Image (cartoon, helix red, strand yellow):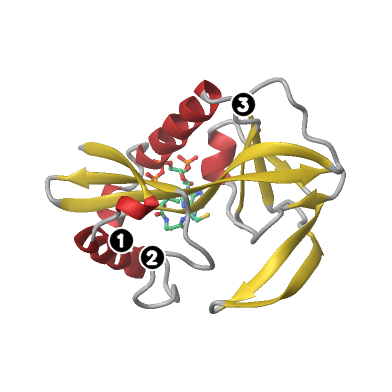
């Protein structure tokens, strides 16, 4: 198994096609022919078994504001593993690699939103229920700003000594 971390602008056409194919299998209803839901990430982890792409995790590196205090975060997007390779800790391993990268580079938190929390709880994430504000984008159109209470849908892991508070989270961009 070969894990690569690639900046988004370096992703080749063949890699894009492989990501689209994996998304079509893992995320029913994902916009066809796209490798991103709202906006391009900054970098991705791609896991190959031979030539076959079997797992993916995209990351947005961004500032957010929590209770008006700015923090640097990694936002996890579109984590998925080919159905034939699940339950072998591949997703957990990708989260661990991202965590080490974040710790080495003074990132404050890893955050994401999810309806099924199990993978993240297994890996030391905490469930939070903050009110959040984000840029609402649909199909390449900015439609406004959303304010919404995310009840038990926000997953957070602190990578240093910063503590997550119960204040308003301003995503300063789209939601993950
Ligand atoms: C979620 C997913 C990436 C896990 O990959 P994986 O390599 O099998 O994960 P690991 O082996 O590291 O861990 C398995 C754990 O993930 C949990 N899990 C399964 N599907 C999950 C999901 N959709 N969301 C969160 N956790 C999930 C399992 O319950 C399991 O926990 P358990 O061992 O306590 O039962 C994979 O099931 C997948 O690609 N699902 C379809 C895409 C998806 O839903 N992605 C998550 C978007 S938030």
The tag on residue 35 is 2
Residue 126, placed above or below residue 80: above
The C terminus, quarter of image: bottom right
The N terminus, quarter of image: top left
Q: Is residue 4 visible?
A: yes
Residue 15, placed above or below residue 162: below
User: How many marks overall?
Assistant: 3
- Coordinates of residue 81 in the picture (x, y in percent): 34, 51
Q: Is residue 130 visible?
A: no
Q: Which residue has dot 1 on it? A: 19
- Coordinates of residue 104 in the picture (x, y in percent): 50, 21
Q: Residues within 10 Å of mark 3 (few under 14, many from 20)?
A: many
Q: Which residue has dot 3 on it? A: 159
Q: Residue furthest left?
A: 50
Q: Decide which of 39, 131 is in the foreground and name it.
A: 39
| Residue at x 27% of width, y 38% of height | 3
SS for dot 3: loop
Q: Determine whether label 2 and label 1 are within 8 Å by CB.
A: yes
Q: Decide which of 139, 79 is in the foreground and name it.
A: 139
The tag on residue 92 is none
């Amino acid at each position: 198994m070969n894990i690569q971390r690639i900046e988004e602008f370096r992703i080749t056409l063949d890699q894009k096609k492989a990501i689209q194919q994996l998304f079509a299998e893992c995320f029913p209803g994902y916009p066809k022919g796209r490798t991103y839901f709202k906006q391009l990430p900054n970098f991705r982890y791609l896991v190959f078994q031979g030539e076959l792409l079997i797992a993916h995790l995209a990351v947005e590196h961004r500032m957010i504001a929590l209770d008006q205090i700015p923090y640097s975060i990694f936002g996890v997007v579109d984590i998925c593993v080919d159905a034939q390779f699940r339950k072998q800790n591949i997703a957990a391993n990708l989260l661990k690699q991202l965590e080490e990268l974040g710790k080495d580079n003074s990132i404050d938190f890893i955050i994401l939103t999810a309806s099924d929390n199990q993978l993240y709880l297994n890996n030391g994430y905490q469930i939070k229920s903050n009110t959040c504000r984000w840029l609402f984008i649909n199909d390449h159109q900015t439609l406004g700003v959303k304010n919404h209470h995310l009840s038990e849908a926000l997953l957070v892991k602190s990578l240093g000594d910063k503590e997550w508070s119960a204040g308003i989270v301003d995503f300063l961009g789209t939601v993950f």
